[in-house]
Amino acid sequence: MSLVLVVVICLFALSTACTEQSSYVQRTLPSGRTIKVAGVTKMYFKKGGHTLLLRYYTDIDISDMNKLQQEVDDIWQSFFRIDVEKAGIKLAIISANEMPKGTVSMTKRHNFIFTRKEDGSWTTKE
């Protein structure tokens, strides 16, 4: 095999490995806002317990906490709280992520953690 062919194969493999596919499902909330849900994952902890993580792409600047909090509250109230409660889970995370750009992308994200209290109400922290 020639050196040129080896280099071409290596470059193709590298470019394929570094490309992040931005797969998501668009969902329109009752407010009219459209979000891009990248996935919902149930995570288990070593010491017991579990959480439900919703990861989505936002068009809002991650540093604009007021707008981001409004969007996350909309997601929480519209459907995710209901899903979490149906699953009997007491800890949930909504992860707001920038949409990846280019082949190698370092995206910003911010996580919002929801915890269910003994009285059934929910608290949130960033």
Image: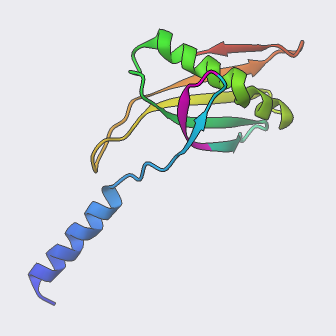
In screen coordinates, is 88 left or right of 13? right
Looking at the picture, tell me which residue is in the foreground, 2 or 110. Answer: 110
> Considering only vertical position in the picture, is 59 above or below 69?
below
Residue at the image point whose x is 82% and y is 13% from the top: 121
x, y (%) of residue 92? 70, 29
In screen coordinates, is 46 left or right of 27? right
Q: Which secondary structure dominates the residues rendered in magenta?
A: strand
In screen coordinates, is 87 left or right of 101? right
x, y (%) of residue 75? 64, 25
x, y (%) of residue 51? 72, 35
Residue at the image point whose x is 83% and y is 38% from the top: 87
Looking at the picture, tell me which residue is in the foreground, 8 or 60. Answer: 60
Residue at the image point whose x is 20% and y is 67% from the top: 11
> Considering only vertical position in the picture, is 20 above or below 125?
below
Residue at the image point whose x is 48% and y is 50% from the top: 23
Q: Residue furthest bottom?
A: 1
Q: Which residues are magenta?
A: 31-39
Q: Residue furthest top?
A: 66
x, y (%) of residue 9? 22, 76
> Considering only vertical position in the picture, is 7 above or below 38?
below
